[in-house]
Image (cartoon, rainbow, N blue to C red):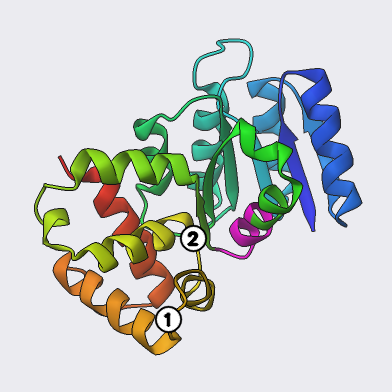
Amino acid sequence: MRVVLAEDLFLLRDGLVRMLEAYGFEIAAAVETGPELSKALAELEPDVAVVDVRLPPSHTDEGLQCALAARRARPGLPVLVLSQHVEQLYARELLADGNGGIGYLLKDRVFDADQFIDAVRRVAAGGTAMDPQVISQLLSRRSQDKPMGGLTPREREVMELVAQGRSNTAIAAQLVITERAIAKHTSNIFGKLGLPPSDDDNRRVLAVLAYLDHD
């Protein structure tokens, strides 16, 4: 699996390269600026991009904007964004097209190799990988909102794990209930959020977007 990596801090970039290679990924390019990232994504067409939000020369959200532009040029390009802090706007922008292949992790997560590599693989496969801290903040901030407030406590637990990108099997294992029960909960969640029947992965992304986009 070919990866384009964008990170301006040399030590972190080098560490990520070594970690990804140790888990069998091929590093197509490891760059440190926005222009270099845009060029690499356009020319190399990687299987997944791992991108720091803030890159030179602007040091604002250049990495994110380069990744979003690449996704517009190549719909569905898997992108995992790394950020120093929880920024709801970043997650909302990533999910705005309603498609999968998207992830948003805090940089602290890269020090947990298993968690980071799982997120990269999940995003590369077309799923979502949202940082638990992002989801936790959204849930606590919006727990009384409608339609979010219409979810039962168990449905909110399930929704938090759906938002992280977990499969029904993984959710069932974590909550120690059956996959059939999880399927029922997710169906109820989709109904309460007003999501029509469609591809299950797409509905899961839209459900996450409903959390991020509801004011």
Q: Is residue 111 above or below residue 11?
A: below
Q: Work out which quarter of the rendered image holds the N terminus and state it.
A: bottom right
- Is 11 positioned to the left or the right of 81 in the image? right
Overall secondary structure of the magenta stretch? helix
Residue at the image position 17 percent from the left and 74 percent from the top: 191
Between residue 55 and residue 105, name the one nearer to us: 105
Q: Which mark is residue 177?
A: 1
Q: Which mark is residue 165?
A: 2
Classed neighbour count for the residue bearing mark 1: other residues with Cα under 10 Å, few (<14), some (14–19), many (≥20): few
Classed neighbour count for the residue bearing mark 2: other residues with Cα under 10 Å, few (<14), some (14–19), many (≥20): many
Can see residue 200? yes
Of circles 2 and 1, the one toward us is 1
Q: Under tag 2, what secondary structure?
A: loop
Residue 125's spot in the image, x, y percent? Answer: 62, 65
Q: Is residue 157 magenta?
A: no
Which contiguous range is marked in magenta?
A: 119-126
Q: Which amino acid lies under the numbered mark 2 shown in the image of this protein?
A: Gly
Q: Is residue 12 above or below residue 106?
A: above
Q: Identify the mark nearer the N-term, 2 or 1.
A: 2
